[in-house]
Amino acid sequence: MRSLSELVAPSKTAILVVDVQNDFCEPAGSAGKGGKDTSAAMAMIPALQRFLGAAREHGANVIFIQTIHEPSTDSAVWVGRRANPDAKNCLKGTWGAEFTGIAPRESEPVVIKHRYSAFLNTRLDSVLRTLKVENIVVLGVATNVCVESTARHGFMLDYHTVFVSDCSAAYDQAAHDMTLRTHQKHFGHVATSREIIDTWTATHSVAATA
């Protein structure tokens, strides 16, 4: 099994920021208005901001994943999965689809997705292959839905996968915890943002003195 330093080596790693968007995080977004508890999503934003700052400082690739829904991609099967088929979120061009507390830099790719997995019918795999990425570090909202779907799909495509526990959030703590346990057991590695940052710092220090 690879060490954490190997799994997050900046030159071979991409940080996938999944669905940190107003409709999923802000209390005034569609999830909050629909009765979901978005407090964990909002609470993890400061840790995510610090983590992205460190990732950029150490040269890791940062890729933003953005859900966009519109009539052309809202199939009957997709819409019909919901208890309320009329509920809408992350509509193209709306406040709800915008990122919460973070934003991509001009050089950082934004991958648009229309389903739970960020790999399904998107350019994500092509972007990762072009950047020569071997490891993906996944985080965002919701832990047990889009982040988990993306992490599992990435593992199936032979990417080493690290789930960042404190930069991900679900609307239910038990679901969050179970996803992390399942990922650690079957799909990859789970680490805190501090563990990864400390690994980057230690590796950089060693390289600087070599």
Image (cartoon, grey):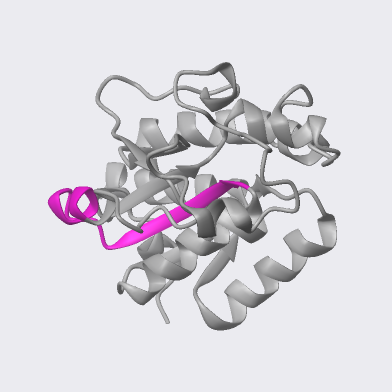
Kindly indicate the quadrant of the structure image that contains residue 133: bottom left
Residue at 29 percent across and 41 percent down: it is 208
Image location (x, y in percent) of residue 23:
64, 30
Q: In this view, does 4 lie above or below 28?
A: below
In this rendering, would 135 be left or right of 187? left
| Residue 107 rendering spot, x and y as whole percentages | 24, 25
Quarter of the picture containing the N terminus is: bottom left
Q: Can residue 164 be seen in this view?
A: no
- The image quarter in which residue 65 lies: top left
Identified at 82% across, 54% down, the residue is 172
Question: Is residue 97 among the parts visible in the rendering?
Answer: yes
Q: In this view, does 145 lie to the left or right of 17?
A: right
Q: Is residue 32 above or below residue 119?
A: above
For the record, the magenta segment spans 126-141
Report the number of numbered marks: 0
Closer-to-camera residue (87/133): 87
Q: Residue furthest front?
A: 76
Q: Position of residue 76 (x, y in %)?
A: 51, 54
Residue 138 lies within the magenta run: yes
Q: Position of residue 166 (x, y in %)?
A: 68, 48
Residue sitting at the far left: 130
Q: Which residue is drawn at 34% across and 49% down?
A: 14
Choose top left, top right, bottom left or bottom right for residue 155: bottom left
Q: Quick check: 69 left or right of 20?
A: left
Residue 140 highlighted magenta (yes or no):
yes
State the residue at coordinates (17%, 56%): 129
In this rendering, position of residue 55 left or right of residue 158 = right
